[in-house]
Image (spheres, rainbow, N blue to C red):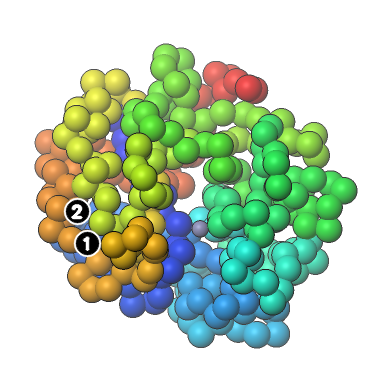
Amino acid sequence: MLPSLAFCNDIDFADWSAYREVHRLLREEYGFQTEDSFWLFDPGGSEMALFKGSLEEKGPRHDDLLEEIARGRLAILHGGGNFSRSNTQVRPSRRLIGEGLVYLRERAKVPQIWTNHGDEGDIQNIGGDAPTYHQGDDPSSNAYILDLLLQGGVQFFWTDHHASDAFAFSANGTAGRPLLVRERTRAGHDITCFFRYRGALPKAPDAQTLSLQLTQRNLDQLVEAGGATVVYQHWCVHRDADGRPRRASSPVFPSESMKALKRLMDYRDRRIVRVMPLTQLLLECSATAGGHQHVR
Ligand SMILES: [Zn+2]
């Protein structure tokens, strides 16, 4: 398999127009087909959540999101919802997220990919084999949802301990650090987890630090290793001088980030790196990894 790269973005702070601007740029300026994440619920009313606090309260862009989900453009379930400590009006529960998953299955589709979101307030997050505050895979919790996610068709999980400073991974698990690992949860389910490249940044990566991720050194390393990578991003986030995150203003990508995307496009055009949607990359890695996926 040709060295391959996919983006995995967390939708924090995005609104509909920032989301649209990012994907128009990636598609039209660089020719990158990329997926993105969404929330089922955001009690705070984000435009990137299907619902506010319950199925009775549709989010402001509900119909637009549902179409993007059905078309496979919004293909990553970001924590099921935004239930962070700053967002306490509604608490996550098995009943609430379960209803959301049924709705997705009937009206669009359930994504194949899950990423943990937020902080210790997001108790619905998945802990894998290293749980702390996580309750999404704790069968004794009111926020237990792992069985519902698996029944709904989720196949790949990113939990808090799968952020990496190393860029290149082994796609098939035979040599080097594998992109996919199997982990046993407290519920007894073995789940497939994937790593994301974060980089040694002081804060979680965003539109302003993308250039520190897509360096020539990193891309060359990916080519040499012949592997795969998943780039962790918050591309609808800019930060103020104190590092506090806020919604990215237009233009979303500063010039250094545009240069880095151009660099990646050049590698793609030289046919030494593929840039592909995350679902496709994970499914390909899973198929080639076969029996090489280790339980940690
Ligand atoms: Zn998040």
Q: Residue at image x 62%, y 77%?
A: 43
- The answer to which image quadrant residue 17 occupies is bottom left
Viewer-closest of 11 and 276? 11
Residue 291, percent from left and from top: 58, 19
SS at circle 1 = loop
Viewer-closest of 234 and 61? 234
Q: Is residue 170 above or below residue 97?
A: above
Q: Residue at image x 39%, y 76%?
A: 16
Outermost front residue: 242
- The answer to which image quadrant residue 41 occupies is bottom right
Residue 10, percent from left and from top: 45, 57
Asked if disc 1 and disc 2 are in contact, CB closer than 8 Å, the reply is yes
Outermost right residue: 140
Q: Residue at image x 39%, y 62%?
A: 244
Residue 23 visible within the image: no
Q: Is residue 105 left or right of residue 245?
A: right
Residue 95, percent from left and from top: 80, 66
Rate crowding at label 2 as few (under 14), some (14 to 19) or many (20 or more) other CA atoms within 10 Å: many
Q: Is residue 109 left or right of residue 267?
A: right
Q: Is residue 98 left or right of residue 114?
A: right
User: Which amino acid type is shown beneath numbered disc 2?
Assistant: Ser
Viewer-closest of 275 and 120? 120
SS at circle 2 = helix
Residue 12 visible within the image: yes
User: Which amino acid type is shown beneath numbered disc 1?
Assistant: Phe
Rate crowding at label 1 as few (under 14), some (14 to 19) or many (20 or more) other CA atoms within 10 Å: many
Cα separation between marks 1 and 2: 6 Å
Outermost top residue: 175
Q: Which residue is mark 2?
A: 257
In the picture, the disc for residue 253 is: 1
Q: Residue at image x 34%, y 31%?
A: 167
Q: Quadrant of the N terminus?
A: top left
